[in-house]
Image: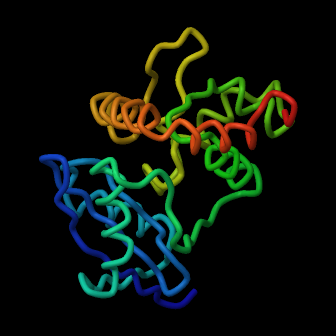
Amino acid sequence: MEDQIVYWRTLTCRRSQIHIAATTRGLCFTGAWNQGFGELAAWAEKRYAQPVFIRDDKGLAEYAEQIQAYLDGKRTHFSFPVDLAGTPFQLAVWQALSEIPFGSTRSYSDIAGHIQKRNAVRAVGTAIGANPLLMVVPCHRVIGKNGQLTGYRGGLEMKKELLILEAAGAAEHPLTTASRSQAFSSETM
């Protein structure tokens, strides 16, 4: 396996810093708040045999601007390319997460049903935990069946803040949320 260049930058937002990274194919990693470069390095070293890190603030500007706009409550979705690598099961789970409308939540069992693996709720949780694109692939929108917040790679405080941010934004953009919610209705599960 050859070296893989991982372009990265730091983004300061919501009183926190996160690291984002991309390959030439698209955004591949968004970090948790205030976790430092080590979080990105550890992830990349598991994914690539020999990652080569290059700081590129200018090259990742579009990703940073869209993430910043989302965190400022001015954006409800992302339009940049992503570079996700995972097992077919993980990719199916991450696709299902991407279909949860802005401002909405689903349970782990909802996701398992959506991908037609109703008995794989624990495996769904594991796949969600392996999601490298926090916020972009919105795993923060998955809560416990009882409505309680559950584990999140970014920590429960980050998850809570993202859900509050989206709830406020959904109230401001009800038509956007309502039309997008049809993409993940119970009829498609």
- Work out whether residue 55 can be spotted: no
- Work out whether residue 105 can be spotted: yes
Give residue 185's position: percent from left, percent from top: 77, 32
Q: Residue at x 19, y 54 (%)?
A: 13
**Residue 71 left/right relative to 167:** left
Q: Residue at x 61, y 14 (%)?
A: 145
Vertical position of residue 160 compared to residue 60: above or below: above
Vertical position of residue 139 compared to residue 121: above or below: below
Q: Tell me the quadrant of the picture where the C terminus can be found.
A: top right
Give residue 74's position: percent from left, percent from top: 35, 53
**Residue 138 left/right relative to 51:** right
Vertical position of residue 148 compared to residue 57: above or below: above
The quarter holding residue 169 reads top left
**Residue 97 left/right relative to 2:** right
Q: Which residue sits furthest bottom? A: 2
Q: Residue at x 33, y 47 (%)?
A: 73
Give residue 126's position: percent from left, percent from top: 59, 38
Q: Which residue sits furthest top? A: 146
Q: Residue at x 64, y 27 (%)?
A: 108
**Residue 35 left/right relative to 79:** left
The quarter holding residue 177 reads top right
From the viewer's side, name the closer residue of 157 and 53.
Answer: 157
User: How many numbered tags mark residues here?
Assistant: 0
Give residue 9's position: percent from left, percent from top: 25, 74
Name the colour scheme: rainbow
The quarter holding residue 151 reads top left
Q: Tell me the quadrant of the picture where the N terminus can be found.
A: bottom right
